[in-house]
């Protein structure tokens, strides 16, 4: 054990009330690197986050596909515990952003364009780049001047927001190019962000389309037990690391060390509670990839990535050993069948039960277990298995419960799902989740 790691383990016995975060990783979630904090159990993390996806994707110096915050240790969090994260606030600060479907540029990466960008001319791996002008060829290798972006658009758009960040409108070429010349300011990039702002590309295939904003975090979670590129900290993108030729390649067994912090689930928004596994001392809470809006599935591959400010409150749940995240969405985000029963519904159900000689109703409450995998079928199986292990049920029982009191919802295509259903209150109490569930859904 290094001196640095030993000092960190000692430090997490106490913690700060609030930890402010404005620094970022180079795209790699590395448990061997220093963490910020620690923040106390019950304390707060306040972060200024940088856009994920497109900006880092056209910045080959960033090695993970995103630019997430440095992890924050939580006092008292030990391997085998869990950390409950209350999302108190998410505020978009960008004035505009660009996004769209991507096209991979051959010859500009080693095995994976998100992880190992390479200059097509001088061959430099993770090359530093500079911007020359605007448009899709503006990203240039600082050493040789070659066009070095690993990605371009197949169909893209530039979208500007109103002052209160409630709606956005996609812009024509003239407006998109006007913004592109001052891209960093319109993106409101944090001072320590090194990404090339995607607004520089000025895409404008969609014009005059109106979209509603409802921001959420595409990345929020805890640090994996081995170094993993941030955008690949999930079962779908993580599968691309198996046998990869770059330095972050893994074996299939090593994927078990992931924490599934990259979910792109639109219910991970203000008011929700996310419960994450602790797989390294201190947990290492990190966040980024704020999205201004997104439909379920993120079917275009990318959405409206923005800068913003986030306030979180963290709580350690001792002895809750979980493999991946559990989400307690705000009530309106729950599937219709999973919402808590009203007093009127309970009264009607009790009358039916008594008519047929059933003397009591099961007390239940909503829970959403995240599953990930190479495809949606594998992700669903993963979520069902995690839910069964958590609550001491069989997978067939979870399937029945999700069918008649919940739903399988797609977070991200190709392989992130929510397995949502009403679970027995006594099972939730046994694993230590009941206080959070009662608090979230107003249950006494």
Image (cartoon, rainbow, N blue to C red):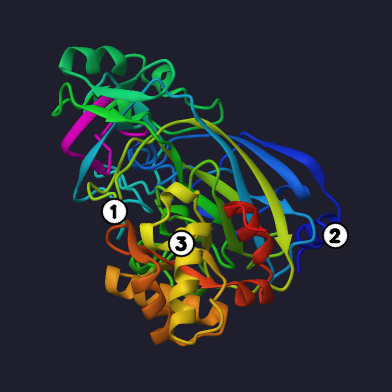
Circle number at residue 297:
1
- Closer mark to the observer between disc 3 and disc 1: 3
Q: Residue at x 82, y 48 (%)?
A: 15
**Neighbourhood count class around disc 2 (C-alpha, 10 Å): few under 14, some 14–19, many 20 upward:** few
Left or right of 262, for residue 207: left
Q: Which residue is mark 2?
A: 10
Sooner in the amino-acid sequence: mark 3 or mark 2: 2
Check if mark 3's residue and mark 2's residue have beta carbons within 8 Å.
no
Q: Nearer the viewer, residue 71 or 250?
A: 71
- Which SS class for mark 1? loop
Circle number at residue 20:
none
Left or right of 383, for residue 35: right
Sooner in the amino-acid sequence: mark 3 or mark 1: 1
Left or right of 440, for residue 369: left
Q: Nearer the viewer, residue 94 or 213?
A: 213
- Which SS class for mark 2? helix
**Does residue 344 show up?**
yes
- How far across and down, in percent of the image, does residue 1 sit? 76, 69
Q: Which residue is mark 3?
A: 345
In reply to whether residue 150 is colored magenta, the answer given is yes
Magenta segment range? 142-159
- How much space separates mark 3 and mark 1, taking CA atoms? 32 Å
- Closer mark to the observer between disc 1 and disc 2: 1
- Which SS class for mark 3? helix
- How far across and down, in percent of the image, does residue 173 sit? 16, 17
In the displayed structure, 339 sits above or below 242; it is above
- How much space separates mark 1 and mark 2, taking CA atoms? 41 Å
């Amino acid at each position: 054990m290094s001196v640095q790691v030993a000092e960190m383990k000692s430090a997490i016995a106490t913690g700060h009330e609030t930890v402010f975060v404005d620094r970022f990783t180079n795209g790699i979630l590395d448990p061997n690197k220093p963490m910020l904090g620690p923040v106390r159990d019950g304390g707060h993390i306040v972060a200024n986050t940088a856009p994920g996806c497109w900006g880092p994707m056209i910045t080959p110096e960033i090695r993970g596909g995103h630019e997430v915050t440095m992890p924050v240790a939580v006092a008292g969090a030990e391997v085998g515990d869990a950390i409950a994260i209350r999302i108190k606030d998410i505020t978009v600060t960008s004035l505009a952003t660009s996004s769209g479907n991507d096209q991979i540029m051959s010859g500009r990466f080693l095995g994976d364009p998100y992880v190992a960008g390479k200059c097509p001319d001088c061959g430099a791996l993770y090359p530093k780049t500079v911007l020359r002008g605007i448009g899709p060829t503006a990203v240039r290798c600082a050493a040789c001047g070659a066009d070095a972006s690993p990605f371009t658009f197949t169909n893209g758009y530039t979208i500007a927001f109103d002052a209160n960040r409630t709606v956005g409108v996609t812009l024509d070429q003239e407006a998109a190019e006007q913004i592109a010349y001052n891209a960093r300011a319109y993106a409101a990039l944090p001072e320590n962000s090194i990404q090339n702002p995607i607004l520089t590309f000025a895409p404008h295939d969609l014009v005059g389309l109106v979209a509603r904003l409802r921001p959420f975090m595409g990345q929020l979670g805890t640090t994996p037990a081995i170094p993993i590129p941030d955008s690949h900290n999930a079962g779908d993108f993580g599968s691309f690391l198996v046998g990869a030729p770059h330095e972050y390649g893994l074996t299939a067994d090593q994927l078990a060390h992931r924490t599934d912090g990259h979910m792109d689930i639109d219910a991970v928004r203000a008011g929700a509670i996310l419960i994450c596994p602790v797989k390294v001392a201190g947990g290492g809470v990190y966040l980024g990839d704020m999205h201004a809006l997104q439909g379920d599935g993120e079917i275009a591959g990318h959405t409206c990535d923005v800068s913003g400010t986030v306030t979180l409150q963290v709580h350690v749940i001792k002895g809750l050993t979980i493999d991946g995240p559990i989400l307690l969405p705000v009530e309106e985000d729950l599937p219709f069948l999973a919402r808590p029963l009203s007093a009127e519904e309970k009264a009607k159900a009790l009358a039916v039960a008594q008519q047929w000689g059933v003397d009591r109703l099961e007390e239940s409450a909503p829970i959403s277990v995240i599953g990930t995998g190479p495809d949606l079928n594998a992700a669903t199986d993963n979520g069902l298995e995690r839910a069964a292990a958590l609550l001491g049920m069989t997978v067939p029982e979870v399937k029945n419960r999700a069918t008649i009191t919940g739903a399988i919802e797609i977070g991200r295509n190709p392989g992130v799902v929510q397995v949502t259903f009403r679970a027995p209150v006594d099972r939730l109490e046994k694993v230590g989740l009941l206080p959070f569930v009662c608090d979230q859904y107003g249950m006494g």
